[in-house]
Amino acid sequence: MNDLRFAIRMLVKNPGFTAVVVISLALGIGVNTLNFSVVNAVLLQPFPIQHPDCIVNVFTTRPGLPYGRSSYADFEDLRDRATVFSGVLARCYWPVSVAEGNGKPEIVLGELVSGNYFDVLGVNSLVGRTFSAAEGKVEGADPVVVISHRFWKRRWAANPKVAGQTILLNARRFTVIGVVPEGFTGIMAGMPIDVWLPITMKAGVHPGDIALRSRDGGWLDIVARLKDGVPTSQAQVAVNTIASHLAREYPDDNRDKQFTLVGGLSSRFPVAEMARGVQVALAILAVVVTLVLLLTCSNVANLLLSRAAARDQEMAMRRALGASRGRVIRQLLIESVVLAGCGGTLGVLFAWWGLQLLALIKPPTMIIPVGLDIRLNMRVLVYTAGLSVLAGVVIGLVPAWRSSRWQLHSALRSGSPAAGSGFRHRAHFQRGLVAVQMALSFVLLMAAGLCVKSLQGVLRMDPGFEFGHGLTVTLNLSYGNYDEAAGRAFFARVLEQVRHLPGVDAASLAVLPPLAYAKTQEKVEVPGYQPRPGESLLLENNFVSSDYFATLGIPILEGRPINERDRRESELVVVVNETMARKFWGSQSALDRTVTVHGNPARVVGVAKDAKYFELAEVPQPHFYISLHQAHLPFTSLLVRTTGDPSALIPTVVRELERLDPNLPITDAKTLTQQLEVQYYPTRLVALSVGAFGLLALALAAAGTYGVMAYSVRRRTHELGVRTALGATRWQILWLVMRQGLWTTLIGAGLGLAGALGAARLLAANLHAVKPIEPVVLAGVAGILATAALVACYLPARRAAKVDPMVALRCE
């Protein structure tokens, strides 16, 4: 306690030094606290279910699709045959329209689930009940719904008598049977569910889609709970056996299917690629913020070493009065830990500010907002406290150890040779720390430069369609009471009315708008083409109406586009892209060729130019288009090509759609430029984050260089005065001091270059349109670092060049 009181008095006595150190540490600890808050919310915060560590995702694996979704029939087989699981559930995310009385419909995220969903997860109801064993077995027989706690509070003001009341979901009446406890919003991070419906009510909320018990296609996520004592590896062997049996029993549908179990952190995401992407992004940020903290600690350690030089005589006096080396080290370590504790406390405040900023940053044009619960909870605060103590030990250990090593007579005799030798040793060590700071800064700036280069590359990518005058509006007839005939008539009226609006050049419908981060796939067969072993002919496709290619400006290279004559009663036709035509027919014409789609023969009537379909970074791949007039799908997007600014026409288009059906929710109306911004958003966010951390690292490194050079000049005042008295010019003194700092920078840049090249190879795999070695980025980083080092060295050097020899000698 005496040491603690003395440490506090010493820090209060030097407010300027204390403020610089505390703020520096607060920045380093604060960004790490903020990053850990996100990691905690995404990966570590446990779901309020029983034994979440026993939960695994079950993916259906096909050639070319290692982590696919499953059919309901496959779910039933796993549920009934797998003895390694205590329970198997099925689920599917499904946005639904909620309406009460004459109020405007609200779009919320729902989930179609098997009847054992809550039983497998171990979630009980807070009000009413959850689904019974009988519910969820007979198609269309159970129009019941379970709602979330927050939805209950928002729509019913937490009325305890909500059970038994009715609610309109997609214009169909459902009975509320229960409310789940507060905190449970599903089992995927960031996707809060508001309503749960039996999976057998699928046709009631989304008619005209895949038949519930069809074995073809995949639309469900399967989640299983392992039995006690059963490892994932044993369960994997069991499901492999089941997959082999199903392949023999159903060779047409299950011949190429396997099941893959994914547990641990990846089980928090229904898409394995999403899990890997999130974990890679968080890992990159974790490395970046750790480097920032190391830079901060290195900078503060340099400051403590400079301060320790002024306390040499104090430490020597303590030793002379009987203090042991351990006693001195303890005192100085307590001071550094107190500094780090203050920095950690302020860092928590910085992290809180960062969370408020994160809350304002939302992904563009999302129908259902992301709902991550990022907060400074007890786990985060414990992490920050531990990090602060660790940082205090790291920054204080070397200065404390070196301060306890001085010989008493050397430290007590001012200006002795030994003291000068001690100064030289300390100066070498401090310059070494500055070199490390420069190296870390080089790595961070290189990473930031690659991220910016990647963003530039993405911005320059050609999507294969014209987007400057386009807009899109999502239309989901599942939200309304439409059968197939009514739906076809409504879509026809939409196209007719919108095409006649002033400022509209063309309009079309498509199941998937361009670059929607969504795929539809169909298995095709091409006469005369023999697939290679393991090759999948599950190809991406889209259902489009007439004028689709004209609306998006996609050229037809051969043949004709899909038109109004391609209807249900006429022959099935497709338009293929040039990659698909080249893959199956080489240099020969693809026109009038036959492909079998979903068991039905279709004639190729056109070849379209390649475009980007799923994401901007994708490589060209086979893709084909089917006439939307030959198949009815209630979920479509209206695409409009305008003659002027498309954003100015959005209100007019939305008003026209609302006039056609006032009860149908119109969602996600945006320009195609905004659609592209959704693709840019992740890269832009990473570039901004890493760039900001890189600039922070550069500022810390420059401050460290300046501090060491200023300390060196102050300790060499006598030497510089003698040099000036002996005839050294101001330019010679200036170069003498700057040379020392520039050599340190050069060494740090060399170390940083080696680290940056290694980091660049890791980053290049997760960025677009960049190489591991980008000469422009390398030259730019080197120039920025050299400029910062020159400025940091020049200021102390200029002060050294102005030293008056008489003042310097008289001072000595």
Image (cartoon, helix red, strand yellow):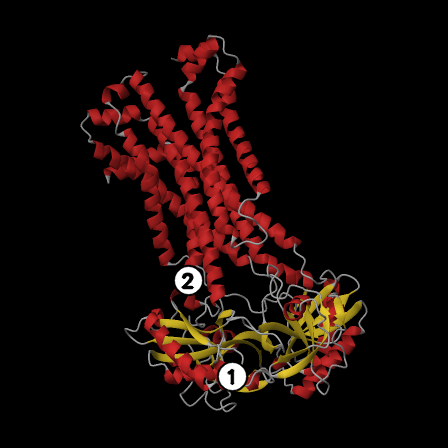
- State the image coordinates of residue 804 (x, y, percent, origin top left): 48, 12
Q: Secondary structure at mark 2?
A: helix
Q: Residue at x 50, y 51 (%)?
A: 763
Q: Is residue 610 left or right of residue 344?
A: right
Tag 1 residue: 252
- State the image coordinates of residue 285 (x, y, percent, origin top left): 47, 52
| Residue 533's disc number | none
- State the image coordinates of residue 434 (x, y, percent, origin top left): 43, 33
- State the image coordinates of residue 747 (x, y, percent, origin top left): 45, 32
Front one among 618 and 494: 618
Which image quarter is the N terminus in? top left
Kindly report the distance in space between the C-alpha atoms of the residues bearing marks 2 and 1: 39 Å
Q: Is residue 416 above or below residue 375?
A: above
- Residue 274 visible in rendering: yes
**Amino acid type for the residue under numbered disc 1:** Asp
Q: Is residue 537 left or right of residue 58?
A: right
Front one among 753 and 671: 753
- Residue 634 visible in rendering: no
Q: Within the image, what quadrant is residue 315 found in?
A: top left
Q: Secondary structure at mark 1?
A: helix
Q: Residue at x 42, y 36 (%)?
A: 436
Give the farthest residue toward the left: 322
Front one among 11 and 315: 315
Q: Residue at x 41, y 19 (%)?
A: 716
Tag 2 residue: 43
Front one among 323 and 755: 755
Q: Point out the tag, 2 or 1, that comes first from the N-terminus.
A: 2
Q: Nearer the viewer, mark 2 or mark 1?
A: 1
Q: Is residue 691 above or below residue 310?
A: below
Mark 1, other Cα within 10 Å: few <14 / some 14–19 / many ≥20: few
